[in-house]
Image (cartoon, rainbow, N blue to C red):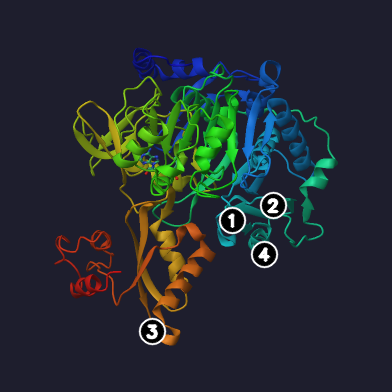
Amino acid sequence: MVIKTFDEYQAAYKHSVDDPESFWAEIAQEFHWRKPWKKTLQWNFTEPTIKWFVGGKLNITENCLDRHLATRGDQPAIIWEPNDPHEASITLTYRMLHDQVCRMANVLKRNGVQKGDRVCIYLPMVPELAISVLACARIGAIHSVVFGGFSAQSIADRINDAQCKLVITADGAYRGNKEITLKGTVDDALIGCPSVQRVIVMTRTRTPIAMFKGRDVWMEQELKQVTAHCPAEEMDAEDILFILYTSGSTGKPKGVVHTIGGYMVYAAYTFQNVFQYKQDGRTGPQVHFCTADIGWITGHSYIVYGPLACGATSLLFEGVPTWPDAGRFWDIVDKHAVNILYTAPTAIRSLMSFGLDMVKNHDLSSLEVLGSVGEPINEEAWHWYDDNIGKNRCPIVDTWWQTETGGLMISPIANVTPLKPAYATLPLPGVQPILVDENGKEIEGNGVSGNLCIKFPWPGMLRTTYGDHDRCKQTYFATYPGLYFTGDGCLRDEDGYYRITGRVDDVLNVSGHRIGTAEVENAINMHTGVVESAVVGYPHDIKGQGIYAYVIIDQAPVDNDTDLMKRDILATVSRIIGPIAKPDKIQFVAGLPKTRSGKIMRRILRKIAEGELESLGDTSTLLDPAVVEEIKEGVV
Ligand code: WT7
């Protein structure tokens, strides 16, 4: 399954388009199936129905753990680097990880979790997070990991949507020099979550926390009660592996559903090929360091499932790139002889701003492949990464994909695909991109741009949105019938290379985090005194996009202190969604530019937020063109 040359890539691509079923069946055969599948693919993009490896039976943890024991039981599976560089790092071999996953799985069973039950995981980036994820998969429970930066309200929404029965959390988390409350936040969330019967709490910061008899148990004590013997549950290829919530242009975040067989095959195949992971690296098995949090899809696919399915060594980092100083990533690369570094443009831009002194005095010679993910990478950041981190000898794979795609979609294959700065380059085998205009008409040829869609299923794609299949259909399959719509704009240059230009819907990408403008507006509107708001993105040097909020209030703020009121609004947004959704700028306005039918003209608000006050285009269709002048004068 490993592509080594560009000719092999082209041959694999052709095979994957000419005969997708035999292409993917060959790859899937390399895994351990309890029972073979009867049909490789069943699909239509109308309902939609997508089934891969129909009738196949397996357990993903047997593929990620058990099958490696004979050949690489003593190889590191996970290397954990703590937040504080003075705390000892931990290495878990495949044997140790297997043992711990089985124990945790038994703890879940002991606490009433059965096959098909939903488990919410709200943990810091510690080994127990990966272990908990795998423990769910071991017994056929469905995990829903919630990123540690989300608020109690967001946790409650996610728990209620999936009707989770159990929550796994910790007392607190360390992030840089900060200590963050986790259990307290979970306690707040659970006031409105009747489905939750049990909370398993691990200690990390050992801060005093409330423990409610009958509901809350300590992970450490539970683990003492169980053995390391836990046979893996036999699962159907199309059983749900996990739910992961992500923002869209409307409403609350939706639960993207991934199923076991296809997701496993796709995560492993893309990991192995794009990063060209080597078991026999210069100093043994290569070390892969993906800096994302397991609370996002990048962590699911490229810290946990992809690397482990390939028997790789995956590094898990608890902290932040700028603590104790902005050289922390380079320190980790040096300390653990990292070979593959996979991070986000926002991190690169942030580290760039601290200057090259932070990179000096770290030995980065172990690096062989660099990756970028989450947002378009600008050429300046690309070259800085290439020159100063890769020292012009490591390919940069700019990987375009989404929570919904499960794995990498358009990306170079390291040392195989000729690169172009800021281009995601070419579709991976099995991926059939198509550009369409607003009417859904295909834009053919090269040197064109349009809306990016995918016209054929791939094994890692989402199957539904949890509890609401119609929402899945409307969001992804109804805009352009017969196509999966990504929400991204894209250009295809003269060489057929793809460059993602950004979202074409009302979704923002702030520091690589996906945030819906409607969600932020709803949160702002919950603040006392706010009548209405409109949120748009604007270019931000480090975050990629910043959040700009135009807010109408019903009367002068208390104490006439507008600055304090803005901070109150930020606190409200933090409470409702989480700190990541806090607007960077708030402008109080008397009115919003609306069409006669009452629709907010975001195009105009975007231009103003971008500072392009002179090129607002046609404003004559506005209900009240005067509001635009007023807004222009009050720009913050
Ligand atoms: C959106 C998906 C799965 C990766 C983590 C984010 C943007 C992602 C790239 C890239 C340009 C990118 C897109 C996409 N995006 N990778 N290499 N170049 N844009 O996952 O939260 O589901 O967000 O991130 O706009 O639609 P996500």
Amino acid beneath label 3 = Gln
For marks 3 and 1, give the CA distance.
Answer: 39 Å
Task: Determine crowd level at label 3: few under 14, some 14-19, many 20+ residues with C-alpha closer than 10 A.
Answer: few
Relative to 92, say whether 126 is above or below.
below
Residue corresponding to mark 4 = 191
Measured as percent of width and height from the top left, residue 577 is found at: 51, 60
The residue nearer to you, when weighing 395 against 234, is: 395
What residue would you read off at disc 3? 555
Q: Earlier in the sequence, mark 3 or mark 1?
A: 1
> Residue 211 at what x, y percent from top left?
77, 60
Q: CA distance from mark 4 to mark 3?
A: 33 Å
Q: Are the two marked residues, 3 and 2, in contact with CB atoms closer than 8 angstroms?
A: no
- Residue type at mark 1 is Asn
* Three-letter amino acid code of the residue under disc 4: Ile
Please indicate, yes or no, whether residue 261 appears anywhere in the rendered image: no
Marks 1 and 2 in Cβ contact (< 8 Å): no
Residue identified by numbered label 2 = 170
Which of labels 1 and 2 is toward the front?
1
x then y, percent, for residue 384 = 35, 38
